[in-house]
Amino acid sequence: MNKKKIINDPVYGFITIHSELIFDIIDHPYFQRLRRIKQLGLTELVYPGAHHTRFHHAIGAMHLMRETLENLRTKGINISDEEFESTLVAILLHDIGHGPFSHALESTLLTGIAHEWISHLTIDRLNKEFNGKLTMSLSIFLGTYPRKFLSQLVSSQLDIDRLDYLKRDSFFTGVSEGTIGAERIIKMLTVKDDQLVVEEKGIYSIENFLSARRLMYWQVYLHKTSVSSEKMLISIIERAKHLTQKGKGLFSTKALKLFLANDFEKEDFVAQPEILETFLNLDDYDIWGAIKVWSEHYDSILSRLCNMLLKRDLFKIEITQEPASEEEIARMEEQIIKAYGVSSKGAKHFYSTGKLTNSAYLSNDKKIMILSKSGEVRDVVEAADLPNIKAMSKIVRKYYRCWPKDISL
């Protein structure tokens, strides 16, 4: 069978799969599942073009990683063929542990278990299936491989993951402010003392990258309508879990039912491998199919929420500089109880309050390092003569409150 394939990507054009191992990984059911998980959750309710998936993103990130590694080789950095392929596999599988709707349900279907940890377990399982061929990839993914710059390319504040998702998300949403010069940044990358650095002449591209990331957070990832719809989805799953665990009859696929009926911890995944196998059968379709059926359920809270989401009758949302007071929350709850005839506990499914944070650059975490012409390596905040980068290293916090539009406060 010919495994040297070409994929036509709308962002980069033709992407070639050069490796039989990579072809087999892409062909695996765990990876094919990523076709059924939207990259941006419910953001399509704001930007209709945002229908791209984790599959698109993983393939694109692999393509950019190949370009990066080839560029580093031209600069005299020794990267063996095994390291080259293993790093491509690491970036290809970095999001393999995402559940339905990507980040939207990360703390609802599972509690206290990040998608990165699920990715770790999944790569480990695939490594066994592929007879140890992913051992180096797993080490690079975990950051334990001796050559640290390879791990930094997979996960850091200037990693290939971010270069692809900013470019891709900007393309599919049509938000031009998120456009970055990924190719230029890749050309400026090099390695100094086993550390990933950016050549000094690329500092303005880094400023644009950080600025684009900050703008994409406010305009896309933390767009108020995206936040509102995700809170509704979370309320639906929380209500479904409550009903299921109370023994109420609730339609769901076999995979979804397992996670509605149980609150698993990491120890459970380790002790019972079938839990991971079931999780890797879950995707957006499980949730949407259930929501359509639940819209006719006898539980008025669940059916109302499902109908609202299906009809895009989303919660009204306000973004403020101060958190909601206890009095505001009590007033919200009181009005919902009156309007919908539900209990105080039931009313909590119809409103949400919380905090939004936007940090384009964290100067205390896996810093972006700039290599000067004299050979000195400095944090981008110190190296830049631009106030913009210094400003972007500050965390911006805003607060939200959302509730049904037909409830007057």
Image (cartoon, rainbow, N blue to C red):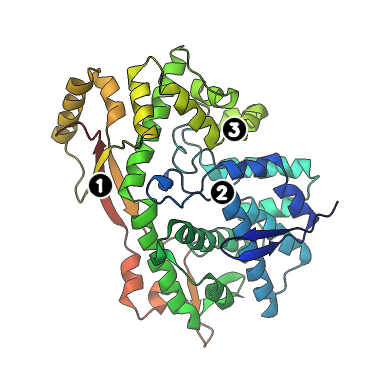
Q: Judge by depth and name the residue closer to the eye, 94 or 156.
A: 94
Q: Amino acid at mark 3?
A: Phe
Mark 2 or 1, closer to the camera? 2
Where 27 sits versus 315, above or below? Answer: below
Foreground mark, 3 or 2, reads 2
Q: Is residue 141 above or below residue 390?
A: above
Give me the C-alpha separation between circle 3 and circle 2.
Answer: 16 Å
| Kind of residue at disc 2 | Arg
Position of residue 139 relative to residue 180, above or below, is above
Q: Residues within 10 Å of mark 3 (few under 14, many from 20)?
A: many
What's the residue at 53%, 51% (across, down)? 52
On the question of residue 147 being in view, the answer is no
Q: Secondary structure at mark 1?
A: strand
The first of marks 2 and 1 along the sequence is: 2
| Residue identified by numbered label 2 | 54
Q: Give the percent coordinates (x, y) of residue 261.
A: 50, 20
Residue 172, position as x, y percentages in the image? 48, 57
Mark toward the start of the polypeptide (3 vs 2): 2
Which mark, by number, is residue 279?
A: 3
Disc 3 secondary structure class:
helix
Residue that mark 1 sits on = 399
- Residue at far bottom of view: 374
Give how far across and how far down residue 329 sits, in percent.
19, 33
For residue 352, side relative to residue 263 (left or right):
left
